[in-house]
Amino acid sequence: MKKSLLVLSGVLAISTALAGCGSKSNDNAGATASATAGSTSSTKAPVTIKVQAWYTEAQGNWNATVDAYNKTHPDVKVVYESMSEKGDSQEGMKKMDLLAASGEQMDVVMYSSASDFAQRVGAGILEPLDSYLAKDKVVVKDDYKLDPIVNGKYYALPGKMIEWFVLLNKDKLDAAKLPVPTEWTWNDYAEYAKKLTSGEGAAKQYGSYFHNWKDYALLALNNNMDNPYLVKSDGTENIDNPQVRFSLNLRNQMENIDKTSVPYFEVVSQKMAYRDVFYGGKTAMLATGNWMVGELAQNAKFKTVFAPYPKYDAKDPNGLTEVGADFMGVAANSKNKQAAYDFVRWYTTEGIQTQGLFFSGWKKADISANVDAILKSGKPDQVAMIDKASLLSTLKVDKATKLVVPPTYALQQEKEYLTQVELYLTGKQDLDKTIATAKTKIEDIRKSNAK
């Protein structure tokens, strides 16, 4: 059976055909036993399984992770291949698209967002996992904190689970005589930013920093339990929503009027890296994902404390935050799909804790043990700068909003939305026109993709 590789808009400007899939019996040749059951010895040469993603070795500790798996699965040799020397997820995913188009060996692949994942499902790059899950009696929504189902099928399991919080420079907080927030709103956040902003010109220290990702153009919408994304699961727009309007108005107020958050123009014109902005002391606060705990354990420059993601409304539950994951699946053109699935299942349960860098989406994972493993992997001087008490209290109040796996064309919709956001934040159009135009363009994309 041949599957067509669709044009991946904004990612890969090619269209080609993927090689046909073999029979199930061929797919399972050399397969190992299930991840939870371990493996038996074999006289055959080990099956080589490639794991491809964008993480560098320093970012992912992948060599030790796959070695741990190989030691208990002698019939398999898992190798990790980084697709980006810089650890850039977009660069890495583009290279994986090229591998899929050229028919190169692919077995285990990962994607960094629900929209990137959905697009590759639509392109036929990923193998459905339902038969493998059924054989292992795995009910995804019971085993994992996220449910990445797409049109009634599973094409991936959640790797690292991403929940958001706010990093704060403790020295700057103390200087401003501000307590570490344990529950706050976006309006409270804006007030903190005013008190944490000081200086002028190149030496100016801002209270806040928002990056140019879509997450930062949906700040308050990320608090929405049921529809925290710019489109709903059916592709219809979610822009005509008071939380979107609030988010954009908040950014404009902070960046262009109060001047307490780094202006959007500076972010994009100077190609700012959010890590460098925080580590360099240019901002006292950074709303970001929990992957930064592992990075701080390696690179912290000062005492860092943690606060829950701010609320849209004071009456909302504390800790409501957008949720994301690395989506790990089996390549449709893999010749060893059972063995690839076995590794996916192991990695998304026991493996992440073995890796010791990220937070797990597995329900059986212990948060405190997860934190200890991440801190243990760090450098002692840097780990000492991480306030473990505020980190644990923040993680324990986090409440993930619903994961929306959007339509396969969602990246096009994101691009159009961010184009309008840029026009607004750089003063080229007002908020009403921004909302109206974004709504129209998002709906036009949905209609053009309707079958």
Image (tube, grey):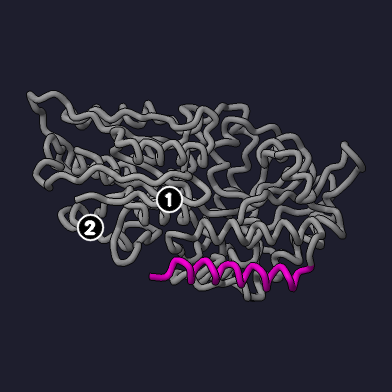
Residue at image coords 28%, 33%: 105
Residue at image coords 23%, 57%: 130
Residue 228 in sight from this viewpoint: no
Q: Amino acid at mark 2?
A: Asp
Q: Residue 408 lies in what quarter of the image?
A: bottom left
Judged left or right of residue 139, residue 441 is right
Q: Secondary structure at mark 2?
A: helix
Rounded to the nearest whole Å, what is the CA distance between mark 1 and mark 2? 26 Å
- The relative height of residue 82 versus residue 264 in the rendered view (above or below) is above
Residue identified by numbered label 1? 7
Task: Name the magenta segment's main secondary structure.
Answer: helix
Q: Is residue 450 magenta?
A: yes
Q: Amino acid at mark 1?
A: Val
Residue 316 in sight from this viewpoint: yes
Q: Secondary structure at mark 1?
A: loop
The mark nearer the N terminus, 1 or 2, is 1
Indicate the position of residue 393 as horizontal and vertical percent values. Answer: 57, 54
The residue stretch that appears in magenta: 430-451
Most foreground residue, 340 or 205:
340
**Residue 130 — which label?**
2
Indicate the position of residue 118 as horizontal and vertical percent values. Answer: 41, 56
User: Within 10 Å of the Cα at label 1, are there few (<14), some (14-19), or many (20+) other Cα atoms?
Assistant: some
**Residue 414 — which label?**
none
Most foreground residue, 402 or 439:
439
Residue at image coords 51%, 56%: 411
Judged left or right of residue 192, residue 13 is left
Judged left or right of residue 150, residue 194 is right
Indicate the position of residue 388 as horizontal and vertical percent values. Answer: 58, 43
